[in-house]
Image: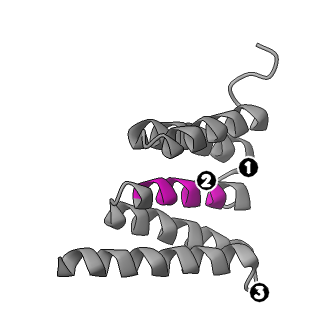
């Protein structure tokens, strides 16, 4: 193996596989691929890094796509916590995470009314 399991390129490949899996509605596979990417990014960058927050957002999005809104909210909040800890000013990533979180809360509320 040229790169080894702890290379950012491998994490990116897992992310690509997750994206394809989500589009095919294979949500369990997508989550597993995103979690593999997350673990690699944590090993490379540590717990508090924008790449880790992006991975958490990606996992949240899959949960949201699968209509598991409570899990999506859990992961969006983890991503926001990291983003806030590494940035002094609101960045586009934090704003997008809050937007995603709000959308998920809205969907969760609509589901409870049904």
Tell which circle, 1 or 2, labels the residue nearer the N-terminal end: 1
Is 44 left, or right, of 101 in this rendering? Answer: right
Tag 1–tag 3 contact (CB < 8 Å): no
Q: CA distance from mark 1 to mark 3?
A: 21 Å
Specify whether residue 72 is painted magenta.
no
> Within 10 angstroms of label 3, few (less than 14), some, or many (20 or more) residues?
few
Return the residue found at the far bottom. 89
Label number found at residue 45: 1
Q: CA distance from mark 3 to mark 2?
A: 21 Å
Magenta stretch: dominant SS? helix
Residue behind mark 2: 55
Secondary structure at badge 1 equals: helix
Q: Quadrant of residue 91?
A: bottom right
Kindly report which numbered mark, 1 or 3, lies closer to the viewer in this rendering.
3
Tell which circle, 1 or 3, labels the residue nearer the N-terminal end: 1
Q: Position of residue 37 (x, y in %)?
A: 61, 40
Specify whether residue 61 is painted magenta.
yes
Secondary structure at badge 3 equals: loop
In the image, what residue occupies the spot 42% across and 63% down?
72
Image quadrant where one finds the N terminus: top right
The range drawn in magenta is: 53-63
């Amino acid at each position: 193996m040229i790169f080894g399991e702890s290379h950012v390129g491998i994490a990116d490949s897992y992310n690509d596989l997750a994206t394809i899996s989500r589009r095919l509605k294979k949500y369990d596979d997508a989550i597993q691929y995103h979690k593999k990417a997350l673990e690699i990014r944590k090993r490379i960058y540590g717990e508090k890094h924008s790449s880790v927050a992006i991975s958490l957002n990606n996992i949240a999005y899959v949960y949201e796509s699968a209509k598991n809104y409570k899990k999506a909210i859990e992961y969006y909040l983890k991503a926001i916590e990291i983003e806030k800890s590494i940035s002094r000013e609101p960045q586009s990533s934090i704003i997008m995470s809050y937007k995603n979180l709000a959308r998920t809360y809205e969907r969760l509320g609509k589901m409870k009314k049904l």
